[in-house]
Image: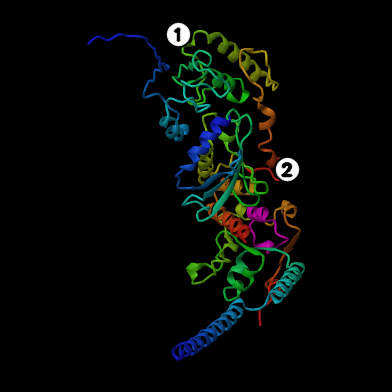
Amino acid sequence: MESRILKEYKDSRSLQSQYILALDPISTDDLTHWECTIKGPLHSPFANHTFKLRIDIPQTYPLTTPICKFEPFAMPHPNVNFETGEICLDILDTNWSPVFNIQYIVEAIVWLLNEPNFKSPLNLDLANLLRFDDLKAYHDLISYHLNNSAK
Amino acid sequence: MTTDHRRLTRNGSLVRTVGTGVVLAIGAGIACWYWWRGPNASQETNRLQQKEEEEHRKEREKEPSRCVIVTKTLSEMKDFDWQKFLKDDIVFIVVPGETFLDPSQGFEIDPKVGYKIIRCDTILGVWSCVKSLKKDSLIVIGDEVEGGIPDDISNFTKNIRDVKSKEELLTIFPIPF
Amino acid sequence: MKVTVKKIYPVYAWSWDIVTRKGEQKSDVYSVLDKYRSEKDDVCGICRASYNGTCPSCKIPGTMCPLIVGSCNHNFHYHCIFRWLNTLNSKGLCPMCRQEFKLDKKLVINSDYLQKFEVLARKNRERRALNVDEEDNGIDNMIIDAAGIEDDSSSDNSNFLGDSHERSDVLMY
């Protein structure tokens, strides 16, 4: 596990991504805790906002999934628990594969921001707005939460 | 001997000129530094304390957060200065078919507070927003909302004010003098 | 001129002869992964170490830490793929293409391990059917240093929708 995470650390030094602004271990002494800053995808209600992700790598990585969370009360999204920042994403759960790496996970999370799924909600109200196909309210409510928590 | 003496006096006047220059420069420097630094440190801490106290006081007197559902009556009060209230902890949820401070009707809204208006395409969406926002009180003209106020809304907002008339509404939103 | 050979120092090098079939079928959903897998084809997708090297728990490369070639043409260190398939989460699938992982029977390199993987697959099918979540360490005593690799089974995954049950209003259809 150590050697693989070391390789990922080396790869992350030369990382170039449109939406990943920073991907660093919290301390270089311990590569099991990472912090990531992502940019909200263009043409999504999250555009022009940045978000912090906390990634904890278990000892059993890559056979088990890293634990990824947004900061509490920072991410209004149908598949993210607003209070805890917990994320519901299939590849972080039942569809995990040991060939995925940290960078791929982060990109999948950015993709999720643009492709919410109301079938596995962690934020019922936003999921319901999608279900009712009320996209105007969906955008405005997300925008409200983003601006309100930014204060 | 005389030449030496003369040199000495010349040197003496040189020392005096340079010395005065240095003293003046230091004086000006100190003056500038005080001017640049502004009020002294103890005044600064005093001011910070006052600011903190004021914030505490504001916190105590904080208005309860409000969620307002914009229906026909509110929507028709076009001349009313709603923008004044956008500074508060308030959200306006606009029901489908109504307009409210719409930019297309010439309203200019400060982008810093504009996010407090949520426009909905469905009535179910309106209630989802109310549930998500969990504000202290809900202000709504129940009779104007299609389907009325759902029973479970009381689980998400402490105080539901079902307004019956425009006059009652004006007591909630007093006209500024 | 006369050349006298006094001593000979033979030096050998070896590498796994890996057959790669191009144009394999890929599932669309995971095509995003392509850029990660295509860059370094000669590393094990699980530990990211070279095929010719060892998995993280071995010291001597070669037959001590052999390569396993799947029928889907994806290769892994024996220890890496065995540990993955030994988790319930794996559902017996290849980490690369999500097809059921089977050994390529035609290859001699796999022949010593065919039976071990068959036993493992059968065992895991039974475990999944019963939804038993305790780890059975008796499957293969040859697997080295399996400690620390836990079986993350249903108990972890069952509560991912937990939040939705806390509220009185259920999702509307």
Which kind of residue does numbered mark 1 sit on?
Val
Inspect this view and state whether residue C94 appears: yes
Q: Residues within 10 Å of mark 2 (few under 14, many from 20)?
A: few
Q: Give the total number of marks visible in the rendering.
A: 2
Circle 1 — which element? helix
Q: Nearer the viewer, residue A2 or B134?
A: A2
Q: Which residues are magenta?
A: B127-147
Expressed as whole percent of the image width and height from the top left, the position of residue B24 reads: 55, 85
Inspect this view and state whether residue A95 appears.
Answer: no
**In this rendering, would B157 be left or right of A2?**
right
Q: Amino acid at mark 2?
A: Glu
Mark 1 highlights which residue? C108
Please tell me how crowded label 1 is: few (under 14), some (14-19), or many (20+) other residues with Cα within 10 Å. Answer: few
Q: Is residue C172 left or right of residue B63?
A: left
The numbered disc on residue C166 is 2
Secondary structure found at label 2: helix
First of labels 1, 2 by sequence position = 1
In this rendering, the answer to whether A109 lies above or below C97 is below
Q: Position of residue C154 (x, y in %)?
A: 67, 28
